[in-house]
Image (tube, grey):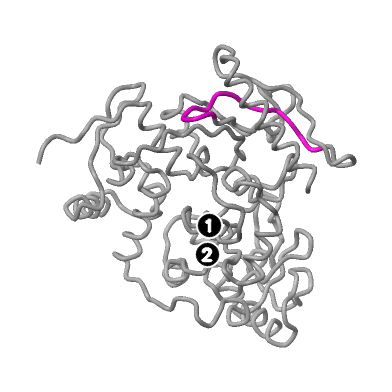
Amino acid sequence: MGSPPTISLEDARRIAVAAAHLGSPPLKPMTDSVVEVARHFGGIQIDPTRTVERTQHLVLWSRIRGYDRQSLDRVLAERRAFEFDAFIVPVDRLPELRHVARTWLEGVGAWRVKARRFIDANAAFRQSIVDQLRANGPMQSRQFDDSTVKVGWESTGWTHGKNTTRMLEFMGVMLEVVVAGRVGQERLWDLPDRVIPADAPQTELTKEEYEEQRVMRALRRFGICTQQEIRLRAYGLSIPDAKTLLARLVAEGRLAPVRLTLPGGEVDGFALPEALDADDRATRTTLLSPFDPLVYNRERTSRLFDFKYTLEMYKPVSEREFGHFVLPILHGGDLVGRLDSERDRKRNELVVRKLHWEGRTPAAPVRAAVDQAVEELREFVRTG
C-alpha cells in the first residue's frame, strides 16, 4: 500500500461542499428530497428563531430547488420523519435512536448524573406522564398534572423549575414519549406507538454497529475530515476505539486515508473513496443558515474555509462585528461573504442591512451570482 494521497485545500473544500449536498445541481422539489436531506445528515436541526426564516427551512431551501415549506409538513404528517431532541430525523434512524435510548442514562459526567438523579427522584411523575398521555392523547407540556413531582429541576438558566419540560425531554431521548406535532411552536407529546409507524425498523444495534453507523454518517456528511472531527460526530467514541474502527474501515475499502493540506500544514485525514473519485465542480451560489451542517462546526469551518464565524445575536449590539443574524454566503467551493439581514414581519419582506465580503470585493460575476441568491432568498421570505 502506497502513501496516502495529498488533497489540496481547494479539493478538500470542493469535496466538503459536495458532501453537504450543496454541489450542482440542487435537489428536485419533492418530499423525497426532504427525506434525503434528513437521512444524509442524520437529522435537520430545529430552531425557533425566525429573524430571516427558521433554520430547518433555510437548510432545505439551500439544497432543494423551489423548496416549499409544506413539503416538510407533509413528510412529518406521513410519519416518514419525526422530531427527536430538537432535530427532524428520518424513521429509518430508529435503530440508532433505540441504542441511544437504552444507554443514555448510563452516561458519565456531571450533566448526566444530574439528569439521572432528577429522573430517579421523580419516578412517580415519570409514570404519570405515560398514564396521562394514554388517557388523554397528545398533550402540551403545560397541560400535564405535575403534582407528583418530588424534586424540582434546578438550573441557573431558563430551564430552572421547568419540571415537566425537563422530564418530557429526558423521556423523549429515551423514546418513552415522542413529539407528535406542534401547536404553533409548542410541542405536542404522545406515546411512541401512536406516532412511530408500525413498520418502522426494529433492528437492535450492538455498540460496535452503532459506532460504525455514526462514523460512516460523519464521513458522508463531511466527505473528508480528520479523526477528531469524526469523533465529535460519533459521540462517545474513544480514541482507541476510533483508531481500531477506522483501521478496519480502511482495510475494508470503505474509507481512504488522506493527507489534508490546511493553512497550518498537512494533517492526516479520511475520506470516502467515492468522494475522492467524484468530479463535482460546484458552481452553486446560495446562503446558509447559521446552523447549516456545512458551517455548524465552527473550528472546522475556520480551518477548511478560513472563515471565522460566530453567531452574534447573543452578543450586545456594541460588540457585534457583522450583525444580529448573519448568513454565510457560499459560492462554488468558497465562503465568500456574510449577509446581515432580517425579515420585516409586517410586510413579510427581507431587509438587507449589509453584505460583507471576505477579503477583497470579488469580481463582477461573483457579485452578480450573490445578488441573484439574495433575490431568491427575498422571494422565499415573501412566500412564508
* Kind of residue at disc 1: Ala
- Work out which residue is located at the far bottom of the displayed protein and give it: 135
Circle 2 Cα neighbour tier, 10 Å, few/some/many (<14 / 14–19 / ≥20)? many
The quarter of the picture where residue 14 lies is top left
Image position of 221 (left or right of 90): left
Residue appearing at x 51%, y 42% in the figure: 25
Residue appearing at x 80%, y 42% in the figure: 382
Where are the magenta residues, as a range?
331-343
- Quadrant in which the N terminus appears: top left
The quarter of the picture where residue 130 lies is bottom right
Circles 2 and 1: CB distance less than 8 Å?
A: yes
* Predominant SS of the magenta segment: strand
Above or below, 167 against 252 in this view is below
Above or below, 45 against 334 in this view is below
Q: How far apart are the alpha carbons under marks 2 and 1?
A: 6 Å
Residue appearing at x 55%, y 31% in the figure: 330
The quarter of the picture where residue 33 lies is bottom right
Above or below, 287 against 106 in this view is above
Task: Please state which of residues 201 and 205 is positioned toward the viewer in this rendering.
Answer: 201
Under circle 2, the secondary element is: strand
Q: Which mark is residue 38?
A: 1
x and y percentages locating residue 169 in the rendered image: 61, 65
| Circle 2 residue | 90
x and y percentages locating residue 52 in the rendered image: 73, 40
Task: Please state which of residues 201 and 24 is positioned toward the viewer in this rendering.
Answer: 24
x and y percentages locating residue 118 in the rendered image: 58, 67
x and y percentages locating residue 296 in the rendered image: 52, 41
Circle 1 Cα neighbour tier, 10 Å, few/some/many (<14 / 14–19 / ≥20)? many
Query: Which of pointers 2 and 1 lies earlier in the amino acid sequence?
Result: 1
